[in-house]
Image (tube, rainbow, N blue to C red):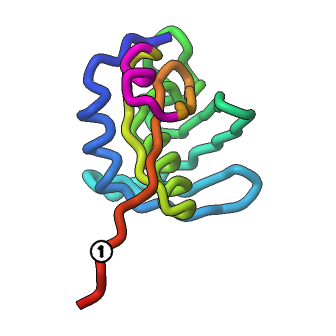
Amino acid sequence: MRNTKDVKGIQKKSKAHEVTPLGDDLYGVVSGASGQGYVVHLVSRGRQAQATCTCPWGTQGGSHAGQGRNCSHVAAVVDFIAQAEERTVSLWASDEEARRQHRPALKVDGLYYTGRRAQRVAAV
């Protein structure tokens, strides 16, 4: 697997993407930076998931080319799913970092997502 060093950068970049569910574990993701559209396939099994993305990073990079490893589009989809469950997620590079959060973690292609209930803003 590719060594992903800047997981917080990936998470920050993912916040600018627009996600649309397409059905059958498929999501359309429009890049907030380029406006290009990509397709993410995310399959979750318990506390682990596998993802593919059609972006250049996902199809050309690293030793697992074509497997969508660790791109911001996958992070955007995980965040989209968490928001639907009224949760927020944080992204971590290692199991050790994720365990320090004392929250359940989802492992997606070598990165770890921890979740917590989203804070609600009171209406004024």
- How many numbered markers are drawn? 1
> At 35% across and 63% down in the image, what residue appears?
119
In this rendering, the answer to whether 86 lies above or below 76 is below
Q: Quadrant of residue 6?
A: top left
In this rendering, the answer to whether 79 lies above or below 55 is below
Q: Nearer the viewer, residue 23 or 113?
A: 113
User: 105 left or right of 44?
Assistant: left
> At 43% across and 12% down in the image, what residue appears?
2
What residue span does the magenta drawing correspond to? 96-103
Residue 43, image x, y percentages:
70, 39
In this rendering, the answer to whether 28 lies above or below 69 is below
Residue 107, image x, y percentages:
56, 26
Q: Which residue is mark 1?
A: 121
User: 115 left or right of 45?
Assistant: left
Q: Is residue 24 magenta?
A: no
Residue 15, image x, y percentages:
32, 53
Amino acid under label 1? Val
Q: Quadrant of residue 35?
A: bottom left
Q: Nearer the viewer, residue 7 or 31?
A: 7
User: 69 left or right of 88?
Assistant: right
Residue 79, image x, y percentages:
46, 50
In this rendering, the answer to whether 95 lies above or below 35 is above
Q: Nearer the viewer, residue 53 or 47?
A: 47
> At 54% across and 33% down in the image, what residue appears?
104
User: 72 left or right of 122?
Assistant: right
> At 64% across and 43% down in the image, what residue appears?
41
Mark 1, secondary structure of its residue: loop
Q: Quadrant of the C terminus?
A: bottom left
- How many neighbours does mark 1 have within 10 angstroms: few (below 14), some (14-19), or many (20 or more)? few
